[in-house]
């Protein structure tokens, strides 16, 4: 398996906005957390949507965002949603696997050859995945596509042997990623996204798989 083959292992759906269903109030402020830093395209889009919601409800419904991981990692956000401290979050699919494992389907390595195939399959599957979440008590408002994930390393990786010698990050709770690495004999280091930057700085990990936009946004 050469590095070229690892270039586009899976489509990265970085965020999924979910809100617990039992929120039925005449007027409400919905608190929504995300790892996305303020100022990114994702946050600009979410804030634009919040303005539309507020205007469309004559101010009865407002969305308050907590960006940049100030509410903790996605697992913490999901716990806070369940106890009512938050009403929603922009969540990576691996964190939703405990709710409905099917949301990880787009992350299967080598499933797509190009973005045209992605668009075609999403046209058929997105609604079904949203329905699966709703059956488990959550309402999804769509996937934020981040593009294909690429292996990025501090040292050259030209062969599978090179990859096995690296300290490769695997997202916490991402069974698809973990299984893919284990199949080729790589023992990854499992960390939540919030700990990856520190892991790179301390040498705990030296190789990550991420779409370019996610790597830049999360530094």
Image: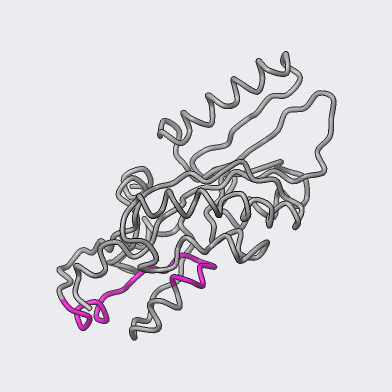
Q: Which residues are magenta?
A: 159-177
Residue 160 figure quarter: bottom left
Vertical side of 59 occupied by 144: above or below: below
What x and y, as percent, mark residue 193?
A: 46, 57
Vertical side of 85 occupied by 64: above or below: above
Taking depth in this image into account, of 22 and 108 the one nearest to the observer is 108
Residue at 39% from the left image edge and 84% from the top image edge:
183
Residue at 37% from the left image edge and 61% from the top image edge:
112
Taking depth in this image into account, of 202 and 114 the one nearest to the observer is 114
* Residue 185 lies in the magenta-colored region: no
* Residue 174 lies in the magenta-colored region: yes
- Identify the image quadrant of the N terminus: bottom left
Vertical side of 151 occupied by 126: above or below: above
What x and y, as percent, mark residue 189?
A: 40, 73
Vertical side of 113 occupied by 123: above or below: above
Q: How many marks?
A: 0
Taking depth in this image into account, of 115 and 83 the one nearest to the observer is 115
Taking depth in this image into account, of 93 and 106 the one nearest to the observer is 106
What x and y, as percent, mark residue 58?
A: 73, 13
What x and y, as percent, mark residue 55?
A: 65, 15
Residue 32 figure quarter: top right
Residue at 44% from the left image edge and 51% from the top image edge:
120
């Amino acid at each position: 398996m050469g590095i070229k083959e690892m270039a586009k292992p899976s489509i990265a759906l970085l965020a999924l906005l979910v809100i617990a269903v039992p929120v039925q109030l005449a007027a409400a402020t919905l608190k929504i957390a995300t790892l996305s830093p303020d100022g990114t395209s994702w946050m600009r889009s979410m804030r634009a949507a919040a303005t539309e919601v507020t205007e469309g409800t004559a101010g009865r419904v407002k969305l308050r965002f907590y960006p940049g991981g100030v509410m903790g990692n996605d697992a913490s956000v999901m716990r806070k949603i369940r106890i009512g401290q938050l009403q929603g979050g922009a969540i990576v699919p691996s964190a939703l696997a405990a709710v409905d494992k099917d949301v990880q389907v787009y992350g299967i390595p080598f499933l797509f050859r190009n973005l045209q195939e992605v668009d075609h399959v999403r046209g058929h599957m997105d609604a079904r995945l949203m329905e699966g979440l709703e059956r488990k008590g959550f309402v999804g408002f769509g996937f934020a596509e981040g593009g294909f994930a690429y292996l990025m390393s501090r040292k050259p990786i030209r062969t599978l042997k090179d990859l096995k010698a690296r300290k490769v990050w695997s997202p916490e709770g991402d069974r698809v990623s973990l299984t893919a690495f284990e199949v080729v004999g790589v023992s990854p280091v499992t960390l939540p996204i919030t700990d990856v930057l520190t892991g790179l700085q301390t040498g705990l990990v030296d190789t990550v798989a991420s779409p370019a936009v996610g790597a830049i946004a999360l530094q």
